[in-house]
C-alpha cells in the first residue's frame, strides 16, 4: 500500500524556537538596552564578587585549620549543594506546573502531532532554565572560589560545568514528575495553591534551620569546641544516595588531586536514567493530567467578608471601596500571593533573633554606644527589609492591572484615585510589618527612649516613601504582559526600585546620623546623654523633606505615565 | 397585562438607560477629525461621525481597517492623536469623567479578574461608575438571571466558559445603566440563543432611548440590526448611511450588505478568485 508519507513531527528544538525567538526579540527591542545591560552587569558583578569574597575568605580560613580543613571545605560544598538541591526541587515543582500544564501556548502544542518525548524534552529544558538560573548564577562564584583557593587548573572549571549540568537535570525530572502526579490527582489550579503552601513552609523551614544553626560561628576561632559540634551536626543531612553528595565528592576529589570518576559517572548516569523514566511517565500520564489541568472551578462563599470590609470603608467613595475590596479579595484568594506572608513572618522572626544574639554586652559605656548605634543603623536594615517586601507586593501592583486597563480606563475613574487606593492597600500592611520590626528590636536591645522615638517616627515616614517609590516606579517600568507576577520584581524596574530605595534609606540615615552622633557623644564625654535640638530639627526636617519628595515625585510620575500610555 | 408582557417590561427596565437619559435629545456620539497614529503608521485618518440618540450604529471594515482602534478611542481606552470625541456633548479629553460615565464598553478580547466571582465583578464595575447599594444588587441579580448566570453568581470567573465570560461582560456594561453601549464584535463566543438575546437586548436598549455603537464582521447581524452603517477602510470612512443609502452609494441596487462591503473594500477580486477556485475544483 502506498500513500503520502506522514509529515515528520516537529523536533524538540523546533518546540523551543518560539520561546527563544521571543527572548531574543524582547532583548533586542527593549528600550535603553545598553544602559539596562550595563546596570545589570554591574549589579551582577558586585554580588558575584561579594559571594566570591566571602567563600574565598572562609575557605582560606578552613585550609589554615590543621587536620579538618579539607573536611570543612568539603562539608561546606556539601551544604551548598544540598541547599541547591532542596531549592531546585521546590522550584522545579512550581515551575513545571506552568511549563507543562498552565502555559497559554500548550493548547497549540498538545493539539499538534508531536511525539510525547519531544514535548517532554522541550518542556524539561524550559523548566530547567526557568527554575535553575538563579542557582546556576550562585554556583559560579562558589565554585570559582574553590578553584582559586585550591589553585587548580582550567580542567577543574570544565569539570565544574560538567558536574552542574546533570545536577540541575535530576531535580528538574523529580520536580516535574511530582507535579505530573499531583496534577493527576488535583486540578492544576488547586495544585498550584497547594504547592505554593508546601513550598513556602519548606523554604521557611530551611531558612529557620540554617539561621538557628548559626553558621557565623564557623568564623570564630574562640568557639572551636562549638565548631566541632557543628561539623557533627552537618554530617547528618548528607547521604551517599543524594546527587548533592556525588557532585561535592566529584569536585573535591579533583581538587584533592585524585579524581574519583565514580561519583561523576553516577551523577550523569542517574540524570540520563531519570530523564528516560521521566519521559516514560510523561507519555503515560501527561494527557490525562493536562485534561484535568483545564478544570478548576471552585465555589466561593457569599458576602460575609465584604460586610466587614464595607464597614471599614464606610466613608470612602463607591469606586474607592470597590477598588480596595477587590485588591484585598484577589490577594487572599491567590494563594501564591498571600502564602508568602508565612515566609515573611519567618524572615522577620529570624531578623529579630539575629539582633538579639549580637554580642553587644561587653562593657558599660561601650555597650551604651553599641546598642544605640545598632538600634539606629537597624533603621536602615529594617528599611531594606520593608523595601524588599514592597518590591514583591507593591511594585507589581500596576503591572497586574495591565490586562484590566480596558475597564479601568473606560470607567469614569480618575487614575489618581486608582493610585491612592493601591497606595493605602500597600502602606497599611507594610506598616504592620515595619513598626514591630523597629519597636521590638529597640525594646530587645534596651535602646534609649530618644533612639526609640526617633527610629519609630522615621520608620513610619520610610514606609510611606518606600510604598510610593515602589508603586510609582512600578507604573513607570511596568510589565503588563506577564503571566507570572513573581517575575515582575526581578525586572529592570524592580532593580531600579531597589537601588532608589537603598539610596533613599542611606540619605535618611545620613541626615539623622548627625543628631544621633551628638546625642551619643554627650554621653561618651561623661554625664547624661543630651539631645541637641537644632541639629535634631534640621536632621529630621531634611529626612522629612526627602521622604516627601520620595512620596510625591514617583506617584505623580506614575500617574502621568499611566494616563499617557496606550493600552 | 399578561405574564409575558410583564417580564418583557421588566427586561426593558433592566436594560434601559437612566430615566434622565431617556428624555435627552440630540447627538449621543460625535467624532470630529479624529486620528490615531502609531509611530509612522496612521491607523485612523481624520474621522468625522455623528450618531444621534436612539440608534444602532454599525461600524464595519476589513481586518486592520481601524475599527477596533476607533472603538477603543470612543471607549476612552486609547487617546486620539488628534481631533475631538464628544459623548452626549461631553468632551472625552477635557471632561473624561462625565463622558465615560455615559458609556458601557464591551471589548472583543477582554481580560477579567479571574479571582473574583461573577457577582463581585458586577459590583466592582458598578462601583467604578460610582454606583452601589441595594439598587446595584437588584440590577446585578436581574442581569444574571437574564443571561442565565444566576447559578454561577458566586463562582470565580476563572471557571467560566468563553460564552459565560462574554455574558458577564455584557452584564457589566449594563450594570451602571449607560446611555451609549460601545461594543466590539458582540457575537463572538455566544450560542445562538444568547446571540438572539443580545440582539433583542440591543433593540430594547435603543427603543428606550439608548444608543449602540458596534463593530462586527458578521454582516448579517449588521444588516438586520443596524439603523445606519459606516464602512471604514484603511483608516477612512468610505461609505455611510442606511442600507438603502449604502446600496445607492455603491451602485448595487437591492444587494445585500456582503456584496456592498466587498465592492467598497476591494474584496471583489477575492470573490473572483473564490469563484475560479470553485470551478477548478468542480472540473
Image (cartoon, rainbow, N blue to C red):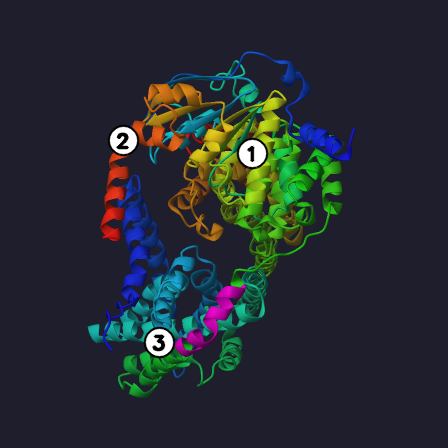
Element at badge 1?
helix
- Residue at mark 1: chain: B
B161 to A282, vertically: above or below: above
Residue range in magenta is A279-292
The Cα–Cα distance between marks 1 and 2, rounded to whole angstroms, is: 29 Å
Name the residue tied to disc 2.
Answer: B266
Q: Is residue A163 left or right of residue B94?
A: left
Residue lying at the far top in this picture: please name it.
B26
Residue drawn at point x = 40 percent, y = 64 percent: A127
Magenta stretch holds residue B233: no
Dominant secondary structure (helix, strand or loop) of the stretch shown in magenta? helix
Name the residue tied to disc 1.
Answer: B199
Q: How many labels does the image show?
A: 3
Element at badge 2?
loop
Element at badge 3?
helix
- The x, y position of residue A559, in whole percent, is 48, 29
The Cα–Cα distance between marks 1 and 3, rounded to whole angstroms, is: 82 Å
- The x, y position of residue A114, in whole percent, is 34, 67
- Residue at mark 2: chain: B
Q: Is residue A526 left or right of residue B268?
A: right
Seen from the viewer's position, the closer of residues A514 and A121 is A121
The answer to whether marks 1 and 3 sit on the same chain is no
Categorize mark 3 by other alpha carbons within 10 Å: few (<14), some (14-19), many (20+).
some
Name the residue tied to disc 3.
Answer: A63
Categorize mark 2 by other alpha carbons within 10 Å: few (<14), some (14-19), many (20+).
few
- Residues at discs 1 and 3 in contact (Cβ within 8 Å): no
Q: If you read the primary sequence from the N terminus, does the residue marked by circle 1 or circle 2 appear first?
A: 1
- Residues at discs 2 and 3 in contact (Cβ within 8 Å): no
Amino acid at each position: 500500500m502506498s500513500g503520502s508519507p506522514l509529515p515528520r513531527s516537529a523536533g524538540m528544538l523546533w518546540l523551543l524556537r518560539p520561546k527563544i525567538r521571543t527572548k531574543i526579540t524582547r532583548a533586542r527591542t527593549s528600550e535603553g538596552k545598553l544602559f539596562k545591560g550595563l546596570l545589570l552587569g554591574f549589579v551582577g558583578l558586585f554580588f558575584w564578587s561579594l559571594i566570591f569574597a566571602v567563600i574565598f575568605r572562609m575557605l582560606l580560613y578552613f585550609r589554615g585549620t590543621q587536620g579538618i580543613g579539607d573536611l570543612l571545605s568539603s562539608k561546606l560544598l556539601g551544604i551548598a549543594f544540598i541547599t541547591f538541591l532542596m531549592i531546585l526541587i521546590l522550584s522545579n515543582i512550581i515551575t513545571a506546573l506552568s511549563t507543562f500544564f498552565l502555559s497559554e501556548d500548550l493548547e497549540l502544542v498538545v493539539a499538534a502531532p508531536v511525539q510525547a518525548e519531544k514535548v517532554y524534552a522541550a518542556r524539561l529544558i524550559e523548566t530547567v532554565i526557568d527554575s535553575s538560573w538563579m542557582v546556576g548564577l550562585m554556583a559560579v562564584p562558589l565554585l570559582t572560589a574553590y578553584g582559586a583557593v585550591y589553585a587548580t587548573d582550567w580542567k577543574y572549571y570544565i569539570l565544574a560545568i560538567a558536574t552542574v549540568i546533570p545536577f540541575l537535570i535530576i531535580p528538574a525530572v523529580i520536580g516535574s514528575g511530582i507535579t505530573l502526579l499531583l496534577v493527576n490527582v488535583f486540578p492544576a489550579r488547586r495544585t498550584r495553591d497547594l504547592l505554593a503552601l508546601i513550598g513556602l513552609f519548606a523554604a521557611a523551614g530551611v531558612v529557620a534551620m540554617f539561621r538557628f544553626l548559626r553558621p557565623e560561628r564557623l568564623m570564630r576561632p574562640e568557639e572551636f569546641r562549638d565548631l566541632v559540634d557543628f561539623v557533627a551536626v552537618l554530617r547528618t543531612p548528607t547521604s551517599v544516595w543524594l546527587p548533592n553528595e556525588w557532585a561535592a565528592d566529584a569536585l573535591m576529589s579533583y581538587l584533592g588531586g585524585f579524581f574519583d570518576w565514580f561519583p561523576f559517572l553516577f551523577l550523569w548516569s542517574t540524570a540520563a536514567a531519570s530523564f528516560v523514566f521521566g519521559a516514560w511517565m510523561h507519555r503515560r500520564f501527561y494527557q490525562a493530567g493536562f485534561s484535568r489541568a483545564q478544570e478548576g472551578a471552585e465555589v466561593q462563599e457569599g458576602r460575609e467578608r465584604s460586610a466587614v470590609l464595607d464597614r471599614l470603608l464606610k466613608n470612602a467613595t463607591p469606586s474607592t471601596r470597590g477598588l480596595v475590596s477587590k485588591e484585598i479579595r484577589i490577594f487572599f484568594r491567590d494563594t501564591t500571593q498571600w502564602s508568602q506572608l508565612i515566609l515573611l513572618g519567618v524572615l522577620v522572626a529570624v531578623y529579630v533573633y539575629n539582633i538579639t544574639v549580637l554580642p553587644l554586652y561587653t562593657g558599660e559605656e561601650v555597650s551604651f554606644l553599641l546598642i544605640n548605634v545598632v538600634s539606629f543603623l537597624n533603621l536602615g536594615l529594617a528599611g531594606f527589609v520593608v523595601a524588599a517586601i514592597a518590591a514583591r507586593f507593591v511594585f507589581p501592583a500596576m503591572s497586574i492591572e495591565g490586562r484590566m486597563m480596558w475597564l479601568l480606563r473606560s470607567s469614569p475613574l480618575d487614575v489618581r484615585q486608582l493610585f491612592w487606593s493601591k497606595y493605602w492597600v500597600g502602606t497599611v500592611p507594610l506598616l504592620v510589618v515595619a513598626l514591630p520590626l523597629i519597636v521590638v528590636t529597640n525594646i530587645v536591645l534596651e535602646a534609649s527612649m530618644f533612639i526609640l522615638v526617633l527610629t519609630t517616627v522615621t520608620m513610619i515616614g520610610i514606609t510611606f516613601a518606600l510604598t510610593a517609590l515602589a508603586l510609582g516606579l512600578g507604573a513607570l517600568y511596568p510589565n503588563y504582559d506577564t503571566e507570572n507576577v513573581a517575575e515582575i520584581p526581578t525586572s529592570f524596574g524592580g532593580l531600579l526600585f531597589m537601588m532608589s530605595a537603598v539610596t533613599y534609606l542611606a540619605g535618611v540615615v545620613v541626615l539623622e546620623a548627625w543628631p544621633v552622633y551628638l546625642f551619643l557623644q554627650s554621653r561618651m564625654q561623661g554625664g547624661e546623654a543630651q539631645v541637641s535640638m537644632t541639629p535634631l530639627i534640621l536632621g529630621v526636617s531634611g529626612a522629612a523633606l526627602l521622604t516627601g519628595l520620595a512620596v510625591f515625585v514617583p506617584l505623580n510620575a506614575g500617574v502621568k505615565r499611566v494616563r499617557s500610555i496606550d493600552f | 397585562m399578561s405574564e409575558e408582557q410583564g417580564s418583557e417590561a421588566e427586561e426593558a427596565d433592566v436594560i434601559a438607560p437612566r430615566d434622565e437619559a431617556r428624555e435627552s435629545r440630540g447627538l449621543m456620539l460625535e467624532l470630529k477629525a479624529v486620528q490615531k497614529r502609531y509611530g509612522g503608521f496612521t491607523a485612523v485618518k481624520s474621522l468625522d461621525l455623528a450618531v444621534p440618540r436612539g440608534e444602532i450604529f454599525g461600524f464595519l471594515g476589513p481586518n486592520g481597517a481601524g475599527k477596533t482602534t476607533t472603538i477603543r478611542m470612543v471607549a476612552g481606552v486609547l487617546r486620539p492623536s488628534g481631533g475631538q470625541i464628544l459623548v452626549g456633548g461631553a468632551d472625552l479629553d477635557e471632561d473624561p469623567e462625565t463622558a465615560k460615565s455615559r458609556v458601557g464598553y464591551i471589548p472583543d478580547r477582554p481580560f477579567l479578574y479571574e479571582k473574583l466571582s461573577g457577582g463581585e465583578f458586577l459590583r466592582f464595575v458598578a462601583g467604578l461608575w460610582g454606583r452601589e447599594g441595594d439598587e446595584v444588587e437588584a440590577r446585578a441579580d436581574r442581569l444574571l438571571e437574564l443571561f442565565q448566570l444566576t447559578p454561577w453568581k458566586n463562582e470565580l470567573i476563572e471557571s467560566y466558559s468563553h460564552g459565560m465570560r462574554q455574558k458577564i461582560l455584557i452584564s457589566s456594561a449594563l450594570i451602571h445603566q449607560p446611555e451609549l453601549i460601545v461594543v466590539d464584535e458582540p457575537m463572538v463566543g455566544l450560542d445562538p440563543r444568547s446571540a438572539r438575546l443580545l440582539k433583542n437586548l440591543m433593540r430594547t436598549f435603543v427603543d428606550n432611548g439608548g444608543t449602540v455603537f458596534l463593530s462586527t464582521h458578521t454582516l448579517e447581524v449588521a444588516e438586520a440590526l443596524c439603523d445606519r452603517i459606516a464602512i471604514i477602510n484603511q483608516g477612512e470612512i468610505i461609505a455611510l448611511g442606511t442600507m438603502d443609502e449604502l446600496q445607492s452609494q455603491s451602485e448595487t441596487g437591492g444587494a445585500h450588505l456582503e456584496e456592498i462591503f466587498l465592492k467598497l473594500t476591494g474584496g471583489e477580486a477575492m470573490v473572483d478568485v473564490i469563484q475560479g477556485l470553485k470551478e477548478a475544483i468542480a472540473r
